[in-house]
Amino acid sequence: MGKMDIVLRLERPEDHHAVEELTREAFWKCIRGFCDEHLLVHRLRKCQVFVPELDYVAEVDGRIVGNIMYTKARIVEPSGKAHEVLTFGPLSVLPEYQNRGIGKALMLRTFDEARKLGYRAIVIFGHPDYYPRMGFRRAAEFGITTADGSSFDAFMALPLYEGALDEIRGRFFIDPVFESLDEKDVLEFDRNFPPKAKYVPVPINVLIDRLEGDARKALEGVGITYLDELAHRSEGDILAIPGMDEKALNTVRQVMLEHGWRWGKRKAQGRPLDLDPARSGDDNRVPDVRSPEEEDRQ
Ligand SMILES: CC(C)(COP(=O)(O)OP(=O)(O)OC[C@H]1O[C@@H](n2cnc3c(N)ncnc32)[C@H](O)[C@@H]1OP(=O)(O)O)[C@@H](O)C(=O)NCCC(=O)NCCS
């Protein structure tokens, strides 16, 4: 595949089903065995905290291949004073279009729009080695903790202008719509989509069997059941486990990649088992992003 043009535009009502389906595809690999993010998308649009001005889709050749959605959230200071911020999620790119700059394009465009709309910052839970590429830093660096007072690498913040978070310290609260969705509701909703084989998570042993000595004992001792659970842990988290070292970390990156997970700050050699070799190559790494107006002029 050669150079790819991406059109970024606001989601329209007639896109709803396609966006829910692409979200389902992007998040299908879920440890629980069923994906609930498409129902979340469906519910988010009806929420008071939903921000329709930032609900963007990415189109390639007229097909919707990516989406980002934002909701309003709050940072509450110990005094009780609350500050409005944004959070995004889901952010989804169809698996066959991943790793070609679409996620990045959706983020950069909406960060700009959010800034223009006057929002101060974005706070998220997400892949801890991916979002720092877009400027996110550990929320703890800004004195922001989760609602229960904790902090970890996957909890990150991005001020939208200089000093936007300087005077703000506190706990981060998101809308209850994000609380775990009822399995019955999800399975019922899922009937609106084509049948799909249940995802079976990958046992952690595929990794443990490739490690040696202390690193092997270290990972056995962490109590992880599935390889998939590493997706939301950072390289730093894993390296901090006593017994792990750079060599072992490289094996983790490698095994993750072999099972389709882009993981870690540095690249593993090779490509995921399900990645089409035809689409690697540098010519499509920096996609051409157009607005619908430019597209109309074509
Ligand atoms: C995460 C996601 C939105 C990224 O979108 P994308 O279009 O594939 O990403 P981009 O092309 O903009 O960025 C690709 C780069 O980020 C890296 N990357 C992607 N996911 C990563 C991860 N989880 N951890 C670390 N790096 C990651 C890739 O290796 C690639 O690096 P390179 O440019 O050095 O080759 C997409 O993979 C997706 O939909 N995943 C499934 C759903 C999901 O997890 N959503 C986010 C929830 S937090």
Image (cartoon, rainbow, N blue to C red):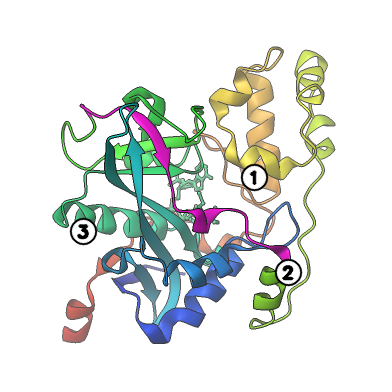
Q: Residue at x 69, y 23 (%)?
A: 248
Are there few (<14), some (14-19), or many (20+) residues within 10 Å of tag 3?
some
In the picture, residue 284 is in which quadrant?
A: bottom left
- Decide which of 200, 297 is in the foreground and name it: 200
Circles 3 and 2, Cβ within 8 Å, touching? The answer is: no
Seen in the picture, residue 166 relative to 160 is either above or below; the reply is above
Q: Tell me if residue 284 can be seen.
A: no
Q: Residue at x 51, y 42 (%)?
A: 127
Mark 2 residue element? helix
Residue beneath disc 2: 184
Q: Amino acid at mark 3?
A: Glu
- Decide which of 4, 235 is in the foreground and name it: 235
Residue 180 in the magenta stretch? The answer is: yes
Q: Is residue 59 left or right of residue 114?
A: right
Q: Position of residue 198 (x, y in %)?
A: 78, 66
Q: Residue at x 27, y 58 (%)?
A: 110
Q: State the extent of the magenta-drawn residues as a range.
A: 166-183
Residue beneath disc 3: 113
Residue beneath disc 1: 257
Mark 2 or mark 1: whose residue is earlier in sequence: 2
Q: Quadrant of the C terminus?
A: bottom left
What label sits on residue 134 in the rendered view? none
Q: Tell me if residue 58 can be seen.
A: yes
Residue 295 in the magenta stretch? The answer is: no
Q: Is residue 254 left or right of residue 101?
A: right
Q: Amino acid at mark 2?
A: Lys
Mark 3 residue element? helix
